[in-house]
Image (cartoon, rainbow, N blue to C red):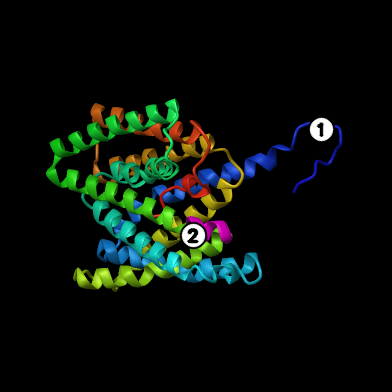
């Protein structure tokens, strides 16, 4: 913990709060470029998910050992939860990566982060409590925004609608991952837990890619290394650090940068121009993401996570 140099300073130094903010912005920036790297890769979308995991896993394991001694010791007795969590994460990545190729980058990023809304809903059901007024408004805004975006996608192309639905499915599966990993996260530090779930998700992704007949071995590695570093190492690593230092409201507002950045990339590179209905729908979902994070106590620490797919 940083101690001020002078006792006359009544407030904490700015860099004590600036570092998590910088990490948060870097994490969101890195995660926003993930869908673009999926499109740039020369392998199938599910195979791209496998390489994202396979290339990042050794580095995550090394970082876990560098951060603490015996980082995986608390995992004893949690093998089933880790295994099922890895399978859910693999299914999340597979559906999201396929969806990325069939909708706009902005929609893929926005719908892929829908676990931010779904996980609190699970919390309400598990606790058998009603959401607060603010959280109820958030859920209503999210539903209205999703209807606008899905309707607009269908007008543009039925394939876009399918892509949106796949990304929504990915958000649902990511919620399942949160639920399964909640006990693991409670007993382990975030980085070792992320490393173990990453390792558990690699075999299902490889098997799925082979069963789908996708090209698995790449001709060019650049996009896959970019995907692994941006999404699984830098993006998730920065977000894990920021979660422990910043409020849910700040996390939620920063999350809104992801679809903005992804939409800008889609606009410039692929000509994915957004209409008025797209902007309105995205804004409604974005407001919902902020409100659901600030409308009451968090259900669990994992709910602050951003899209790891």
- The residue under the point 63% across, 40% down is 18
Residue 34: % across, % down:
37, 53
Give the residue pinned by disc 2: 233
Question: Which of the 4 quarters of the picture holds residue 264?
Answer: top left
User: Is 233 left or right of 205, judged from the image as shown?
Assistant: right
Counting every numbered tag in the picture gives 2
Question: What span is in magenta?
Answer: 182-187
Q: Secondary structure at mark 2?
A: helix
Residue neighbourhood size for the residue with mark 2, other residues' Cα within 10 Å, grouped as few (<14), some (14–19), many (≥20)? many
User: Is residue 264 something that shows in the picture?
Assistant: yes
* Foreground residue among 82 and 10: 82
Whether residue 150 is situated above or below residue 277 in the rendered picture: below
Which quarter of the figure is the C terminus placed in? bottom left
**SS for dot 1:** loop
Quadrant hosting residue 136: top left
Residue identified by numbered label 1: 9
Residue 100 on the magenta segment: no
Q: Residue at x 42, y 45 (%)?
A: 126
Q: Main secondary structure of the magenta part?
A: helix
Choose the circle earlier in sequence order: 1 or 2.
1
């Amino acid at each position: 913990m940083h101690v001020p140099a002078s006792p006359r300073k009544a407030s904490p130094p700015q860099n004590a709060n600036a570092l998590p903010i910088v990490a948060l912005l870097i994490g969101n920036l890195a995660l926003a470029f993930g869908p673009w790297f999926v499109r740039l890769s020369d392998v199938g979308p599910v195979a791209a998910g496998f390489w994202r995991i396979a290339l990042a896993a050794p580095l995550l394991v090394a970082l876990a050992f560098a951060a603490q001694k015996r980082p995986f010791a608390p995992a004893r007795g949690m093998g089933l939860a880790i295994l099922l969590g890895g399978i859910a994460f693999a299914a999340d990545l597979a559906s999201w990566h396929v969806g990325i190729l069939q909708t706009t980058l902005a929609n893929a990023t926005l719908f892929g982060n829908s676990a931010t809304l779904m996980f609190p809903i699970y919390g309400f059901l598990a606790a058998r409590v009603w959401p607060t007024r603010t959280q109820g408004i958030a859920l209503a805004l999210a539903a209205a925004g999703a209807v606008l975006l899905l309707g607009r996608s269908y007008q543009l192309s039925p394939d876009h609608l399918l892509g949106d639905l796949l990304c929504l499915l990915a958000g649902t599966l990511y919620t399942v991952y949160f639920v399964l990993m909640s006990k693991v996260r409670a007993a382990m530090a975030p980085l070792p837990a992320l490393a173990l779930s990453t390792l558990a998700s690699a075999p299902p992704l490889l098997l799925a890619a082979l069963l789908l007949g996708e090209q698995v071995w790449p001709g060019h590695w650049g996009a896959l290394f970019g995907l692994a570093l941006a999404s699984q190492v830098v993006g998730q690593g920065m977000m894990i650090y920021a979660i422990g230092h910043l409020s849910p409201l700040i996390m939620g507002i920063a999350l809104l940068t992801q679809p903005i950045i992804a939409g800008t990339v889609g606009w410039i590179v692929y000509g994915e121009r957004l209409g008025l209905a797209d902007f309105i729908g995205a804004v409604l979902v974005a407001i919902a993401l902020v409100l659901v994070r600030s409308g009451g106590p968090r259900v669990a620490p994992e709910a602050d996570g951003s899209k790891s797919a």
